Amino acid sequence: MPYTRLGRTALQVSRLCLGTLNLGVRTTEEEAFELLDDALERGVNFVDTANHYGWQRHNGYTEELLGRWFARGGGRRERVVLGTKVYHPMSELPNDRGLSARNIIASCEASLRRMGTDWIDLFQMHHVDRDAPWDEVWQAMETLTRQGKIRYVGSSNFAGWHLAAGQEAAIRRQYLGIVSEQCVWNLVSRHVELELVPAAQHYGIGVLAWSPLHGGLLGGALRKQADGTAVKSAQGRAMVALRTRHTEIVEYERLCAEAGLDPAEVGTAWVLSRPGLTAAVIGPRTQAHVDSAIRALNLTLPDDLLKRLDELFPPIGNGEPAPEAWLGG
């Protein structure tokens, strides 16, 4: 398993991050524990969750599941770089959401209790809060850092200018600030290449790609629908995108077949090959999903296939970062 630094920090994380959105919801709890154990034994040391995950049962369920997994011992907690998130509503109460200092601190303490741990390695803002001043956000994060409850701060679903504004505010306070940004990045959704990735590279912020297969769309969705095995790709963002990108997906699966490669492994390998990418966040439901992602780590896509993928799923503008994207080079 290859490891890399998380942004400009010295923290070493695996290039695959195990996302927990499906655990205990689309798996049984015991199946979730088996997936976590297997991934850890194979070198995946990066685990990502969020305070509201598991909402299908109740908010906080997935963190509770992780707490039960850590409680099994065997050095599980010590071996894991643990990330969770704050922002989304956890109740109907008006202050039980967002990035106010009150909610940031209360949410962190609640996550610690649910997971039965003393610290969170990466505490991520799950979405920008346009009502929260950066000085308020950083005051809360500094408090948690001093208390030893968090080690690093990350963001998720930010725009490039949000990273710049937040990091400049942290610099003024002589605080480390944002060390990672988790964003949707895949062949179908390449918007982040325009401004977010350049901003992250400028500030030394690691980029974590969630939904590298666009909700299963790039994992052989048409083949799975044909043989009746589609699960994730038959709903959500994949189903919506398939209506408008059907022609491209037909061609994508044909290209993969001609190359003798699995579509899911091609999609994951493509994301992992992107400049500025720290890790791909995978959301496995089965052992086969973990196996596929690990094979993708060792897959080098040939130049001719990369060229065809760029033609099929072109970057925004002319492939340059902003403002060259709209200036024509």
Image (cartoon, helix red, strand yellow):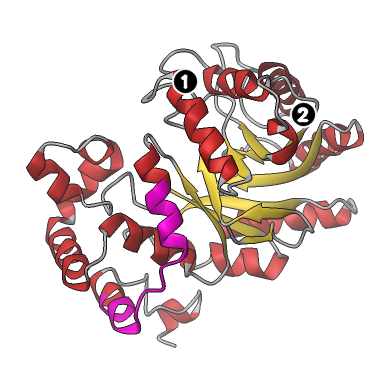
* Residue appearing at x 58%, y 42% in the figure: 41
User: How many neighbours does mark 2 have within 10 angstroms: few (below 14), some (14-19), or many (20 or more)?
Assistant: some
- Give the secondary structure at mark 2: helix
Residue at (42, 30) in percent of width and height: 22
Quarter of the figure that contains the C terminus: bottom left
Amino acid at the residue labelled 1: Glu
Q: Does dot 1 land on a helix, a strand or a loop? A: helix
Instruction: Give the numbered dot on residue 60.
Output: none
Image position of 206 (left or right of 170): left
Residue that sits furthest to the bottom in the current view: 329
On the image, numbered disc 2 is attached to which residue? 101
Give the residue at mark 1.
30
Is residue 226 visible to the viewer in this orientation of the structure?
yes
Q: Categorize mark 1 by other alpha carbons within 10 Å: few (<14), some (14-19), many (20+).
A: few
For the view shown, which residue lies furthest in the left direction? 226
Which portion, as a residue range, is magenta? 291-308
301 magenta-colored: yes
- Asked where in the image residue 305 lies, by quadrant, the reply is bottom left
Q: Is residue 277 above or below residue 41?
A: below
The quadrant the N terminus occupies is: bottom right
Q: Position of residue 171 (x, y in %)?
A: 84, 57
Q: Is residue 44 above or below residue 144?
A: below
Pick the residue in front: 86 or 297: 297
Q: Nearer the viewer, mark 2 or mark 1?
A: 1
Q: Quadrant of residue 94?
A: top right
**43 is within the stretch colored magenta:** no
Cα distance in 3D space between marks 2 and 1: 36 Å
Give the side of residue 168 with respect to residue 261, left or right: right
Q: Main secondary structure of the magenta part?
A: helix
At label 2, which amino acid type do we have? Ala
Q: Judge whether residue 191 can be spotted in this image.
A: no
